[in-house]
Structure formats: structure tokens, C-alpha cells
Image: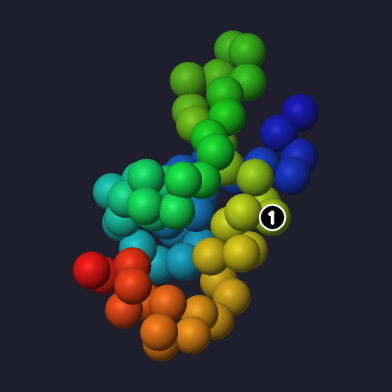
Amino acid sequence: MTEGYVSVDEVADEIGVNRVTVWKWVKRYELPTFRFLGERRTFLRREDVDRLRQPVPVEETKKLAA
């Protein structure tokens, strides 16, 4: 049912960060979140999470920090 989606907790475990950090990324990068009927957890699309793992030019990180 949730194929192609990962929970916020799973993302945090995979990347090695706190779940609060994942929520900050959701807000900062405007990542869409999803819920499935009967589930209380929040999910992100796997493709969006994979995008977070891609290298970002240093210039872009400076813009995000400002």
C-alpha cells in the first residue's frame, strides 16, 4: 500500500538525522507529505527523498542559508 513512500521516521533513520531535521527539510524545500487512510504516520515520496541525497552546488547552499 505504501510502496514508493517512506515515513518521516524511516527517512531520519536512513539518512542518520533526527526526525525534527526531516520536518525542517519538508518546510524548507516544500516537500509534499502524504497520509494513507488508516495510517497515523506521515509519508514522503521515495523520489523526493532521493532528491535530497543529490549533491547541491555550494552557491545554492549559501542561498538557502540566507
Q: Is residue 14 visible?
A: yes
On the image, the x and y values in percent for residue 11 come to 50, 54
Check the image and name the residue furthest to the left.
66
Q: Quadrant of the C terminus?
A: bottom left
Residue 10, x across and y down, in percent: 50, 50
The residue type indicated by label 1 comes to Glu
Q: Which residue is mark 1?
A: 47
Residue closer to the observer: 56 or 22: 56
Query: On the rendered structure, is 42 left or right of 65?
Result: right
Where's the N terminus, which quadrant?
top right
The quarter of the picture where residue 51 lies is bottom right
Residue at 50%, 80% (x, y): give it.
56
Q: Residue furthest bottom?
A: 58
Residue drawn at (63%, 20%) of the image: 36
Look at 59% across and 12% down and name the residue there.
Answer: 38
Q: Is residue 63 above or below residue 46?
A: below
Which residue is painted at 41% across and 87% down in the image? 58
Q: Of residues 15 and 24, which is closer to you in this image?
A: 24
| Image vertical order of residue 35 relative to residue 23, above or below | above
Q: Is residue 41 above or below residue 6?
A: above
Percent position of residue 19, x then y: 34, 49
Element on which disc 1 rests = helix
Q: Position of residue 48 (x, y in %)?
A: 62, 54
